[in-house]
Image (cartoon, helix red, strand yellow):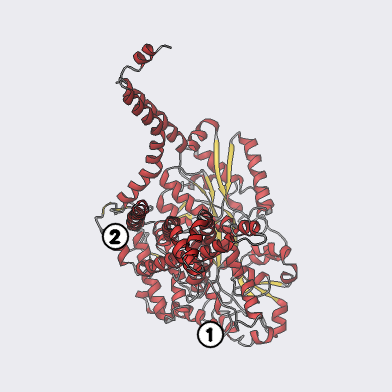
């Protein structure tokens, strides 16, 4: 008996130790008033330094201790899913707009509608950015960073080619001799990675198309295969991509380049123009020679379409766990204070009263009226479907119409897998 | 404390053998608990989930799935290409690593000037973190500004830059090449240690029998390396086939799934489609494959041991 008592005792001690390890953060939160925040900024950049100051001030004001960890978005995305499965979520995280539908579906984001509505600073936040945080009328996040994509051009390269900055797809496709005159391709696009679906979304939106639209009952569906007019427009978008390569407007390698390559190519002058964000301002310091002639323009659109750009309103998520919700919301709001935003997000703040005087701020903000976002569904696999569809056209030689049909079918399959498909 | 008091205190341990067993169990128990918690539980959970509908996002279809997840994975159009890529990636990598490792080990076993430096330098690729090695190679292989394309075009070897990691014709081969570069030093060091342990007498005896250098290599060196070769080849067959990070850093399975292997498919199922059931069934299939490989290894190893003894 005594022997078994000792063995059971030993097992219990080790098991308790394991349990204590697993729930460390929640017990910390209760006893020492600790809040956990996961951020995502470029290490060494000004944003990180300023955010650390904001956190220190918050700690001073509230008495809470804030445990901050910085990750890339990809890393954080995977970690969140693992934490959710383990029931050990952090309190506040800086996220991407693509996660809104997914986190809502997973049920891990707090509904902060009443807190946002009561928030004194709500009126200072851009309506478009705030609306991007809503699902079925409720807020599941607040925007901490908001920017749109613009069409950046190297003025001197265009002058060398004797070409005007294109405003339409047709202008763009007519620049067939640009490469021979300058040795540089006039345009570029991303064919893989997270940037590709964002670009495709914009070109589709320029024809009034969305990757999935809300149906009666609140669920979503891609309707192209049921609507010949929509399918014809989607086909035109894939044809546009194909023509860009076959007409020598874009390097054929673009079909497999990610955002790291395309941003680098533009910053170093390897490509004459590219649709990207105002974070490229940072490249003025690292590539002063090639970045000094950059102009900010609206993204070219088809003459039978309309202007559109990608609105990237990044949400601060308050996640569901044992920690006091009010404290978590307060920390999230601290990142949205005018002081914090001015210091850390001057060129890309969702606050209407925070704006810089440079082209990276003013010229980008001018384009925000035409911003579009992903629908509030789980887009993780839909993004992969979008990448695959373009690969089928540009690498497998699939006909644009077949690619549009394929994408429509696959998007609906992805929606069905996550119980988000409307009947 | 005298012995009679000790016996009274641990009265239930009457014999010396019982006390020894009790002591061994006590010492092993913490390790066993950790093994059960950290390896046993996840393993059992994966096998369990393989037969259930488990989705990270929705619980509407949760329940027993039978072989449904296995059928779903096998019916996936990416499954057979990924299986083929996994086999090619694993076999070509391991063969390449072995050949390069053996060659470099033989060279480094010779008495040459600067041998200590070369022995140390050859280990560097294996010491570089995977993320650093992967990123560096992807920059070096870039068609627009990569140093490799720059040299190849300037030396007139190729007319225009090759998109090594972005062209479906080159991507898998390039990934395998970079993997061989990274892993062969492990073979070099292991085989070098084995080479140094071969007694000179064997070579002298072979020489007296009239064996030339090639025959000495064939009949003395290779048989002496058999045991260590078996271990490192089988370990690498398993390590390479389950490798995720190196391919992910280099190509993320692209372009257009040209380098997609089974571990990447598992990742996509769980992290992109949130279908933990399908991910678990594919993991279970891989686990089964690896276990069969291990059984084969164990039998082969036992056979070699028996031959050595006899």
**Residue A262, percent across and down?**
60, 70
> In the structure shown, which secondary structural element does the residue marked by tag 2 occupy?
helix
- State which quadrant residue B281 falls in: bottom left
Q: Is residue A377 visible?
A: no
Disc 2 or disc 1, which is closer to the eye?
2
Q: Which residue is located at x 52 percent, y 39 percent? A: A326
Left or right: B84 with respect to A97? left
Q: Residues within 10 Å of mark 2 (few under 14, many from 20)?
A: many
For this orientation, the residue located farthest to the front is B208
Quarter of the picture containing the N terminus of chain A is: top left
**Residue A21, percent across and down?**
47, 36
Q: Chain of mark 1?
A: A
Identify the mark at residue B70; answer none if there is no mark: 2
- Which residue is disc 1 drawn over? A246
**Residue B99, percent across and down?**
49, 66
Q: Chain of mark 2?
A: B
> In the structure shown, which secondary structural element does the residue marked by tag 1 occupy?
helix
């Amino acid at each position: 008996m005594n022997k078994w008592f000792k063995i059971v005792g030993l097992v219990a001690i080790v098991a308790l130790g394991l349990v204590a390890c697993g729930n460390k953060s929640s017990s910390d939160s209760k006893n020492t008033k600790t809040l956990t925040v996961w951020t995502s900024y470029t290490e060494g950049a000004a944003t990180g330094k300023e955010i650390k100051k904001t956190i220190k001030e918050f700690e001073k004001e509230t008495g809470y201790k804030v445990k901050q960890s910085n990750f890339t978005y990809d890393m954080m995305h995977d970690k969140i899913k693992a934490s959710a499965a383990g029931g050990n979520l952090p309190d506040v995280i800086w996220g991407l707009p693509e996660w809104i539908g997914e986190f809502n579906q997973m049920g891990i984001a707090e509904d902060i509608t009443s807190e946002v509505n009561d928030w004194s600073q709500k009126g200072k936040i851009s309506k478009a950015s705030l609306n991007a945080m809503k699902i079925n009328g409720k807020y599941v996040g607040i925007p901490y960073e908001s920017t749109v994509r613009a069409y950046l051009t190297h003025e001197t390269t265009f002058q060398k080619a004797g070409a005007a900055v294109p405003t339409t797809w047709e202008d763009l496709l007519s620049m067939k001799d640009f490469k021979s005159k300058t040795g540089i391709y006039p345009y570029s696009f991303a064919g893989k990675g997270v940037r590709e679906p964002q670009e495709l979304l914009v070109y589709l939106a320029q024809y009034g198309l969305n990757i999935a639209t809300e149906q009666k009952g609140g669920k979503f569906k891609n309707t192209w295969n049921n609507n010949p007019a929509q399918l014809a427009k989607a086909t035109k978008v894939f044809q546009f991509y194909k023509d860009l390569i076959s007409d020598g407007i874009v390097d054929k390698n673009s079909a497999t380049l990610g955002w790291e390559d395309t941003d680098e190519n533009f910053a170093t002058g390897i490509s004459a123009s590219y649709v990207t964000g105002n974070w490229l301002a940072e490249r003025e310091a690292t590539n002063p020679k090639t970045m000094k002639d950059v102009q900010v323009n609206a993204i070219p659109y088809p003459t039978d379409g309309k202007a559109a750009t990608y609105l990237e309103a990044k949400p601060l998520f308050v996640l569901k766990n044992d920690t006091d919700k009010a404290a978590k919301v307060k920390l999230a709001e601290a990142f949205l204070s005018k002081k914090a935003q001015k210091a850390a997000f001057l060129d890309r703040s969702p606050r209407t009263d925070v704006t810089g005087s440079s082209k990276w701020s003013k010229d980008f903000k001018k384009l925000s009226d035409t911003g579009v976002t992903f629908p509030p569904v789980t887009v993780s696999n839909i993004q992969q479907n979008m990448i695959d569809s373009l690969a089928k056209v540009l690498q497998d030689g699939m006909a644009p119409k077949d690619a549009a049909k394929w994408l429509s079918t696959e998007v609906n399959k992805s929606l069905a897998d996550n119980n988000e498909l409307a009947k | 404390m005298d012995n009679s008091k000790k016996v009274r205190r641990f009265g239930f341990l009457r014999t010396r053998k019982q006390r020894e067993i009790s002591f061994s169990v006590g010492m092993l128990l913490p390790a066993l608990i950790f093994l059960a918690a950290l390896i046993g539980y996840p393993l059992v959970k994966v096998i369990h989930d393989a037969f259930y509908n488990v989705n990270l996002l929705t619980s509407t279809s949760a329940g027993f799935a039978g072989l449904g997840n296995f059928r779903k994975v096998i019916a996936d159009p990416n499954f057979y290409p990924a299986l083929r890529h996994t086999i090619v990636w694993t076999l070509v990598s391991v063969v390449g690593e072995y050949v390069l490792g053996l060659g470099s080990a033989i060279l480094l076993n010779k008495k040459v000037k600067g041998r200590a430096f070369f022995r140390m330098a050859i280990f560097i690729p294996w010491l570089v973190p995977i993320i650093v090695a992967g990123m560096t190679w992807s920059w070096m292989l870039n068609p627009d500004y990569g140093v490799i394309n720059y040299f190849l075009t300037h030396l007139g070897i190729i007319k225009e830059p090759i998109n090594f990691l972005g062209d479906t014709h080159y991507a898998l081969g390039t990934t395998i090449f970079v993997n061989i570069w990274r892993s062969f030093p492990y073979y070099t060091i292991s085989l070098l240690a084995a080479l140094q342990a071969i007694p000179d007498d064997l070579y002298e005896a072979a020489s007296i029998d009239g064996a030339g250098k090639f025959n000495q290599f064939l009949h003395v060196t290779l048989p002496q390396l058999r045991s260590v070769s078996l271990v490192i080849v089988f370990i690498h067959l398993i390590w390479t086939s389950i490798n995720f990070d190196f391919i992910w850093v280099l190509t993320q399975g692209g372009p257009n799934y040209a380098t997609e292997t089974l571990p990447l498919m598992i990742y996509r199922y769980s992290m992109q489609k949130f279908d933990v059931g399908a991910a678990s069934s594919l993991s279970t299939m891989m686990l089964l494959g690896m276990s069969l490989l291990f059984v084969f290894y164990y039998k082969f190893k036992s056979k070699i041991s028996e031959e050595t003894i006899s």
